């Protein structure tokens, strides 16, 4: 596991005294491995600021007890025995409840020392998955990390069967190791929660890839909406910086303003069916301007939303504005406050994105956004009316209905978009593969390729995307994912050392200035000044 737990020796001593004929090492290892797995999931899924501050983890004590193993002739659950003998490895601060479907909030006891970003030593590749990928005929199947992570592999006999369940993705292990080294220097621009999450995820990926010769497996989870997701840690679920470390040296291509491009493309055709003289360039000019000039319009909206004294970094401003615009394009409402439902407070998407009320008000009232919102409402109405008329059976899909049973317009539009997005990206991958290029990973409206596309091939792909899907606004944007180097960690450490020296020098300067001022004050008292100001 990417999280390593070390247990105080007094626990094993107490177990040895209580169960002298049992294999204490094996029993304790099983329990600790289960606990490591549960804590890893808690960190990967994300902890709240309160949990981070109090060092709490969300995990199921029921699972820990059931999967943590038994000990002794009477088959006592190890978890129960540890609690009864006042040797618990976790302390429940708030126990879970089946009625509320909430898991327990626990804190590690003083008997436990935890290390994040643990890099396991790969002793052997004699596990089922590694055999399949390497073509080995070895029959040894040790319970490695890979076998625990992918238990299905034990029953799979061919690569074809394996690839029906998993998507293999090559990992730049040197770049990923350098990123882990950098994370361990505790970079200041990352919150502790994000740092620990990245450290946990990166170490897990690296441990798996090391066992599998540079390959990481992503377990597919197809969605009824058309996309393919992955369970657990994947290229889709990690932060961009970690993805860059995983695929350093590759190129990422994504559809520019994908949702808006699709909606304008669909809406333009539908508007012309209603009125042959309709001019999409006039009807949807704000949306089209955003597609064609995204950096400029985002910068303009940032200037209208934020003030200099708001102390919001320029990069963060752009990120917030882009998220808010994407949310609007997916049907986010303009509600400026949340609501209480079943005893739980819910915030609208825009309130979660633009948390500051003044920022939210300025954003929603600025001219570009007002025009954009009105156009999105028109596009939503056109696309929804098309679905009702041309695809009536689609509306019977229970996944497109709210809890009350009403058909959801945003869900219908999201369903249509994601199917078209998948169609477009399948075209991209098909052409790239036919040209002998490698698709390293897929991320919904983006792909990661082994190398940069030439201008001619890129233009060919874009043309084919537009012709097959009927969306004339598809456009691919590419960026190089630069690998992390070991020097990155050295530079980070040197920067920290430099800052430490600066603080020490500053402290010395303050002490020197204080001493000098005190000395001058003593001199002034000993030698009173004359009327002319001279002693």
Image (cartoon, rainbow, N blue to C red):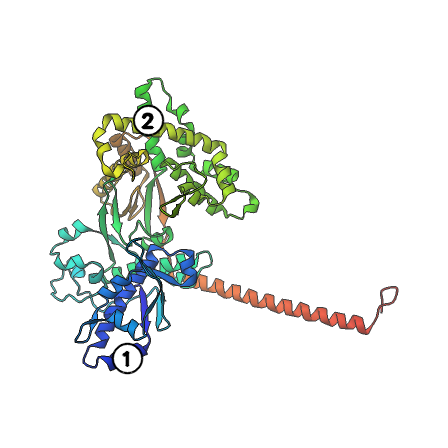
- Mark 1–mark 2 distance (CA, rounded to whole Å): 71 Å
Q: Quadrant of residue 150?
A: bottom left
Q: Earlier in the sequence, mark 1 or mark 2?
A: 1
Instruction: Give the position of the N terminus as an image quadrant.
Output: bottom left
Question: Which residue is under mark 1?
Answer: 14
Residue located at (45% from left, 61% from top): 492
The numbered mark at residue 382 is: 2
Decide which of 372, 247 is in the foreground and name it: 372
Residue 27, percent from left and from top: 22, 72
x%, y% of residue 192?
42, 59
Q: Give the farthest residue toward the right.
A: 531
Quadrant housing residue 81: bottom left
Q: Is residue 528 above or below residue 321?
A: below
Q: How many marks?
A: 2
Q: Position of residue 509 (x, y in %)?
A: 63, 67
Figure quadrant of the C terminus:
bottom right
How crowded is the residue under tag 1: few (<14 C-alpha within 10 Å), some, or many (20+)? some
- Note whether residue 245 is visible: no
Could you say whether the residue bearing mark 2 is in a helix, strand or loop?
helix
Closer-to-camera residue (452/25) = 25
Dot 2, crowdedness within 10 Å: few (<14), some or many (≥20)?
some
> Which-is-in-front pick, marks 1 and 2?
1
Mark 1 touches mark 2? (CB < 8 Å): no
Indicate left or right for 23 with 271 as reference: left
Residue 60 in view (yes/no) = yes
User: Eyeballing the image, is 111 above or below 39?
Assistant: below
Q: Position of residue 116 (x, y in %)?
A: 35, 65
């Amino acid at each position: 596991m990417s999280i390593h737990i070390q247990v105080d020796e007094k626990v094993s001593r107490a177990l040895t005294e209580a169960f002298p004929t049992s294999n204490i090492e094996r029993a304790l290892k099983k329990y600790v491995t289960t606990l490591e797995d549960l804590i890893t999931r808690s960190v990967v899924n994300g902890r709240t600021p309160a949990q981070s501050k109090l060092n709490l983890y969300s995990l199921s004590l029921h699972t820990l007890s059931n999967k943590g193993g038994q000990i002794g002739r009477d088959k006592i659950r190890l978890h129960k025995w540890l609690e009864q003998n006042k040797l618990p490895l976790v302390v429940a601060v708030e126990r879970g409840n089946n009625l509320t479907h909430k898991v327990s909030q626990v804190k590690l006891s003083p008997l436990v020392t935890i290390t994040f970003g643990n890099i396991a030593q790969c002793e052997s590749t004699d596990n089922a998955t590694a055999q399949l990928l390497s073509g080995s005929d070895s029959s040894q199947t040790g319970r490695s990390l890979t076998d625990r992570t992918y238990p299905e592999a034990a029953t799979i006999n061919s690569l074809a069967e394996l690839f029906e369940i998993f998507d293999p993705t090559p990992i730049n292990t040197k770049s990923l190791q350098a990123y882990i080294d950098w994370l361990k220097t505790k970079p200041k621009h990352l919150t502790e929660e994000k740092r620990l999450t990245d450290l946990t995820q990166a170490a897990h990926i690296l441990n798996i890839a090391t066992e599998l010769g540079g390959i990481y497996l992503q377990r597919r989870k197809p969605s009824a909406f058309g996309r393919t997701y992955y369970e657990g840690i994947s290229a889709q679920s990690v932060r961009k910086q970690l993805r860059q470390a995983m695929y350093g040296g590759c190129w990422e291509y994504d559809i520019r303003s994908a949702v808006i491009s699709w909606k304008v493309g669909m809406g333009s055709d539908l508007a012309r069916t209603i009125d042959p003289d309709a001019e999409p360039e006039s009807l949807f000019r704000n949306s089209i301007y955003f597609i064609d000039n995204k950096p400029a319009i985002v910068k303009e909206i940032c200037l209208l939303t934020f003030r200099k004294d708001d102390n919001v970094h320029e990069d963060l401003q752009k990120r917030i504005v882009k998220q808010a615009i994407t949310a609007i394009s997916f049907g986010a409402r303009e509600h400026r406050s949340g609501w209480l439902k079943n005893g739980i407070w819910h915030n609208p998407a825009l309130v979660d994105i633009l948390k500051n009320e003044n920022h939210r008000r300025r954003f929603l009232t600025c001219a570009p956004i007002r025009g954009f919102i009105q156009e999105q409402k028109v596009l939503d109405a056109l696309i929804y009316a098309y679905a009702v008329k041309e695809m009536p059976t689609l509306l019977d899909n229970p996944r497109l209905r709210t809890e009350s049973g009403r058909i959801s317009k945003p869900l219908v539009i999201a369903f249509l978009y994601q199917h078209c997005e998948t169609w477009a990206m399948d075209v991209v991958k098909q052409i790239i593969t036919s040209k002998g290029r490698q698709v390293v990973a897929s991320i919904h409206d983006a792909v990661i390729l082994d190398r940069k596309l030439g201008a001619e091939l890129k233009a060919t792909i874009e043309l084919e995307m537009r012709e097959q899907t009927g969306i004339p606004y598809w456009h691919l944007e590419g960026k190089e994912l630069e690998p992390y180097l070991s020097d990155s960690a050295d530079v980070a450490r040197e920067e920290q050392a430099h800052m430490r020296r600066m603080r020490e020098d500053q402290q010395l300067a303050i002490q020197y200035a204080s001493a000098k001022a005190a000395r001058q004050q003593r001199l002034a008292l000993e030698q009173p000044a004359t009327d002319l100001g001279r002693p």
